[in-house]
Amino acid sequence: MRRNSGPAPPASPFAAEDPPGYFPRILGHEAYGVVESVGKNVADLTEGDTVIPIFLPDCGECMDCRSKKSNLCTKLPFKVSPWAHRHETSRFTDLNGDTVYHFLYVSSFSEYTVVDIAHLTKVDSAIPPNRACLLSCGVSTGVGAAWRTAKVEAGSSVAIFGLGAIGLAVAEGARLCGATRIIGVDVNPDKFEIGKKFGVTDFVNSIECGNRSVSQGWGKTVVLGVDKPGSQLNFSSSEVLLHGKTLSGSLFGGLKPKSDVPILLKRYMDKELRLDEFVTHEVSFEDINKAFDLLLGGKGLRCVIRMDNCLKESFVFFGKELVVAMAEEEKRPSGTAGKTIRCRAAVARKAGEPLVMEEVVVAPPSSHEVRIKILCTSLCYSDITFWKMEDPPGYFPRILGHEAYGVVESVGENVADFTEGDTVIPIFLPDCGECTDCRSKKSNLCTKLPFKVSPWMHRDETSRFTDLNGDTVYHFLYVSSFSEYTVVDIAHLTKVDPALPPNRACLLSCGVSTGIGAAWRTAKVEAGSSVAIFGLGAIGLAVAEGARLCGATRIIGVDVNPDKFEIGKKFGVTDFVNSRECGNKTVSQVIIEMTDGGADYCFECVGLSSIVREAYDSCRKGWGKTVVLGVDKPGSQLNFSSFEVLHHGKTLCGSLFGGLKPKSDVPILLKRYMDKELRLDEFVTHEVSFEDINKAFDLLLGGKSLRCVIWMDN
């Protein structure tokens, strides 16, 4: 985007309505984030780095940046510009394509922003985001003014005019330097009690000084406050000459952003520097105007603004710049362990009706539970099935969704194998690791926590969700991933490698794992064998992929949609039968003819008892195996004569989650994907934002989608 025509921004402090006050503009410059991706010519920062943006550049190349004497970069001189630093263009436009201006090269009041690498300082990821962000400007300015600019000496006296956040930060800096008398000057006597926390020893109310001047004295005067443009300081030459005082300005406290700020953060982590006391309020991004009201009303020192109910940001680079996305604190709101969280969820209020986007309250995890931040989720046909059900096990209001990828936000008691920050996928089938079945290689059906389609958490049969009226919102398959946060029992969680793409890993929460596992673990498809798959939806295609990996030489797809054959070829399907075009023959007769006696393995992936019957008839007598994967409506029956069961020598079995052990087999599949053996990319036909979740339903119901990935936060 090219820069709009108009007056060049003057290199002077900002004003309200006239330049350098530009509108529309995204303000904000104290922040904390995580590098999300990097562009060209970026060597010192990489994806995943935790950083704070700082309005003052530190290029590291010019004479001033290399010198210890100055923090004023000459390569990229600071000015209050409405543009990105190097190119003087904007990285923001509104939905009409019109320019939105930057502020102080940061613009952190946006979920995403673009920042030049000269304005970024890498910091320790262990530092709390809602403390580290304070050092982007004000607190660093005050502490640095005492430490770097004034070089306050131990045993000295200090007077601070104005006990706002910066003035109190000066007091904190003077305290750290060993000043023995720190005098605060303000018109608000309440500031004295606040100042005592930062080392203020005395207080002067400038309104109550009568005719006495509080500005007389000797020593060094450091100017930190930003006056209105055009304001002048007037001194006589004689007083400057004869009084022996020093006057200096202190931009960013004289600190070198990339070297000095990490020192301050270390001193905070070492419990030397006080930062906690500066944070008087925290609000959500939606309540940002409340932060303005608090500061304008003199009621706050620093109000931390949580983006998306969290406190971390992520950055995307463009050339020597990056985009800041206010995202989660790897991935949890600070200080929420043991507390409820309000977040967005897509709630099914009535059977068959579009999901309703609303705020819900998510309780903290109980014993053996963790709360996770969902990064992305995908829509499975099981969600559709239960969404349509008016009677139990269809419960409403309910948060559906069970294929997902997330990050552990907090853990409850009796949780040993998971910790905050772990990347996980929730799985509807439990794997407690303790009962006979979970310890055995013969079964994946936990006996300690038997699977059932319950609207509750697994162990105590209660819900962790309520709506804003306090009414219960039901769970689904122990996951409920159509919510930004959810609580999951540890038996239903599998830890995965964080290097995995979220929009691929989530596929293995249910459908794709079920299909691949059915061929691999349940049927144990042999190399050179023949396979018939009834229904070429996502699960059926996953069966084909599993059969391909096992070495099957003939994989027959059966479906009413001939377009599925071309799709199926990607996953190893070699032949196609359109069940509507078999003439006077049944599908089983066609397959028996094609395979000279019947397929070695048949898989029913639709969820109809009539098709189970057809699949059973299509498999070879003597050793044929039919595996049922489709979910039929409750109460549906399968009918076989005892004679055929006894005499035909066939095997019929179900395959819940493909016979896989969630905690041990799913990581194997993910490794095979990363090793480029297992095909997952081809399953994702669509991706939508959380707001468009109902579009995902329309795509799947219309037969246009295999898997639609739903991103929770764009």
Image (tube, helix red, strand yellow):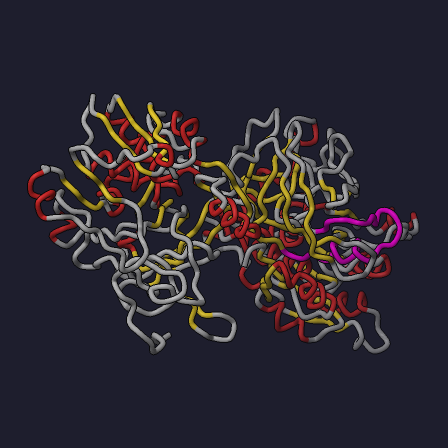
Image coordinates of residue 404 in percent, x first then y, are: 61, 49
Q: Name the dominant secondary structure of the magenta segment.
A: loop
- Please check the rendered image and state whether residue 108 is part of the magenta-colored stretch, yes or no: no
Quick one: 469 or 114, which is closer to the camera? 469
50 left or right, relative to 218 = right
Residues rendered magenta in the picture = 378-400
Residue 281 visible in image: yes
Residue 332 visible in image: no
Height in image: 424 above or below 704? above
Residue 705 in which image quadrant: bottom right
497 left or right, relative to 132 = right
- Please check the rendered image and state whether residue 386 is part of the magenta-colored stretch, yes or no: yes
199 left or right, relative to 291 = left
Quick one: 332 or 488, which is closer to the camera? 332
Q: Quadrant of the C terminus?
A: bottom right
Height in image: 435 above or below 35? above
92 left or right, relative to 434 = left
Image coordinates of residue 202 in percent, x first then y, are: 33, 24
Looking at the image, which residue sits at the far front? 211
Quick one: 180 or 567, which is closer to the camera? 180
Name which residue lies at 27% across and 33% down.
Answer: 212
Image coordinates of residue 566 in percent, x first then y, are: 62, 73
Name which residue lies at 78% across and 70% down.
Answer: 590
Name which residue lies at 43% across and 64% down.
Answer: 25
